[in-house]
Amino acid sequence: MAELKTKVNDQSVIDLLNSVDDEKKKEDCYTILNLMKQITGAEPKM
């Protein structure tokens, strides 16, 4: 079986979102982040 290319790491999700230059995209990212936290009850991981 093939090995997964994406793995959980210690990078900050917030740092990644803050690095988005386009303000509308950044706002959308935070909206999705908050929705996913509400739905899953889990903290985000990279």
Image (spheres, helix red, strand yellow):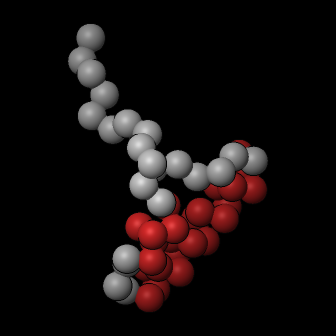
Q: State the residue at coordinates (65%, 51%).
A: 43
Left or right: residue 3 versus residue 29 is left
* Most distant residue in the front direction: 10
How many discs appear? 0
Q: Which one is nearer the viewer's eye here, 8 or 28? A: 8
| Residue 24 in the image: above or below residue 33 | below
Q: Quadrant of residue 23?
A: bottom left
| Quarter that holds the N terminus | top left
With respect to residue 32, does 37 lie above or below? above
- Furthest residue in direction bottom, as rendered: 23
- Image quadrant in which you'd find residue 40: top right
From the viewer's perspective, is residue 27 above or below residue 35?
A: below
Vertical order, 36 against 16 (above or below)? above
Give x and y (percent) for residue 44: 58, 52
The residue that appears at 57% across and 72% down in the rendered structure is 30
Q: Position of residue 31 (x, y in %)?
A: 61, 71
Q: What x and y, as percent, mark residue 18?
A: 45, 77
Q: Pick whichever, 14 or 39, lies toward us.
A: 14
- Residue at position x 66%, y 65% from top? 34
Viewed as shown, does residue 46 lie left or right of 6?
right
